[in-house]
Image (cartoon, helix red, strand yellow):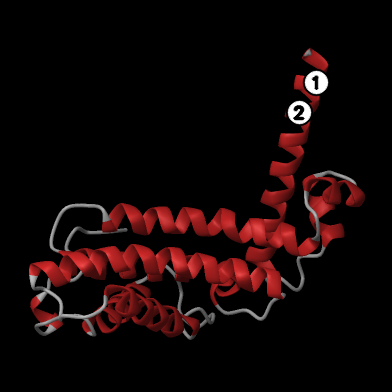
């Protein structure tokens, strides 16, 4: 029994190292250059052993995407589920997502827009769907409270999510340094413009990012 437990523990540790190595390489250079041999080398395992933990390269990449996207979705979810007006939470959530994307722009580009295999793209669509569902619930609240126009929450959430993700593709280029006033200004602009489409009244009346998010 002890041997079985040790073997299972080693397998979990190896799988985790592979995922961490793959995530690091995608963050450095994207999907195309994160090759299995290099991932195995970074993880300290044989190349063939990667396929004992993952069915294919696409499966590994899809799980890397899931690992990262679950973290980002959890951060958005925490803001969406917090206290305060629905409009404020909507702007704050988009602002934080945008700011974090610019902090890890190469990884964010891979998650949002980089050309990739069909399996990875399916995982990416699932990730976008998670975010859209979070925003749909928040928009539903805003419609009920009268903050937002009377609109189908699911359709509106898809439009909002598509708008801020598309807007981020340009700022993910290397011209804007992360964690600067310029980056925060871009994140505020994206949040304000993407959210504006559902507001009943003009957005400038809202104190954008009022909770001092970092």
**Are there few (<14), some (14-19), or many (20+) residues within 10 Å of tag 2?**
few
Q: Residue furthest top?
A: 1
- 157 left or right, relative to 173: left
Instruction: Check contact, mark 2 vs mark 1: CB within 8 A.
Output: yes
Alpha carbon separation for disc pair 2 and 1 = 6 Å
- Tally of numbered tags: 2
Q: Residue furthest front?
A: 152
Specify whether residue 104 is in view. Answer: no
Q: Secondary structure at mark 1?
A: helix
Instruction: Tell me: residue 113, above or below residue 18.
Output: below
Picture quarter with the C terminus: bottom left
Q: Looking at the rendered structure, which numbered label has been put on residue 8?
A: 2
Specify whether residue 196 is in view. Answer: yes
Residue 176 image point, x, y percent: 45, 79
Residue drawn 44% across the image and 63% down it: 130
Judge by depth and name the residue closer to the eye, 204 or 158: 158
Instruction: Tell me: residue 211, above or below residue 163.
Output: above
Residue 8 image point, x, y percent: 76, 28
Q: Which residue is mark 1?
A: 4
Residue 32 image point, x, y percent: 75, 74
- 146 left or right, relative to 66: left
Residue drawn 50% across the image and 78% down it: 172
On the image, which quarter does residue 60 sit in?
bottom right
Judge by depth and name the residue closer to the eye, 44 or 126: 126
Residue drawn 41% across the image and 65% down it: 131
Q: Secondary structure at mark 2?
A: helix
- 50 left or right, relative to 99: right
Residue 99 image point, x, y percent: 39, 68
Judge by depth and name the residue closer to the eye, 141 or 201: 141
Q: Looking at the rendered structure, which numbered label has been put on residue 20?
A: none
């Amino acid at each position: 029994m002890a041997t079985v437990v040790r073997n299972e523990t080693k397998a979990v540790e190896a799988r985790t190292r592979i995922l961490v190595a793959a995530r690091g390489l995608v963050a450095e250079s994207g999907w195309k250059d994160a090759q299995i041999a290099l991932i195995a080398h970074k993880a300290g395992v044989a190349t063939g052993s990667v396929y004992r933990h993952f069915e294919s390269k696409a499966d590994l990449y899809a799980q890397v995407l899931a690992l990262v996207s679950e973290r980002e979705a959890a951060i958005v979810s925490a803001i969406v589920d917090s206290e305060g007006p629905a409009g404020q939470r909507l702007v704050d959530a988009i602002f934080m997502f945008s700011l974090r994307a610019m902090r890890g722009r190469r990884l964010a580009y891979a998650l949002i827009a980089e050309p990739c295999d069909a399996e990875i793209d399916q995982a990416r669509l699932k990730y976008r769907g998670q975010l859209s569902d979070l925003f749909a619930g928040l928009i539903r609240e805003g419609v009920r409270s009268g903050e937002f126009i009377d609109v189908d929450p699911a359709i509106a959430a898809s439009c909002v999510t598509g708008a801020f993700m598309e807007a981020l593709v340009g700022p993910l280029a290397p011209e804007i340094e992360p964690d600067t006033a310029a980056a925060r200004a871009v994140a505020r602009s994206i949040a304000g413009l993407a959210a504006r489409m559902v507001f009943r009244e003009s957005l400038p009346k809202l104190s954008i990012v009022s909770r001092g998010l970092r």
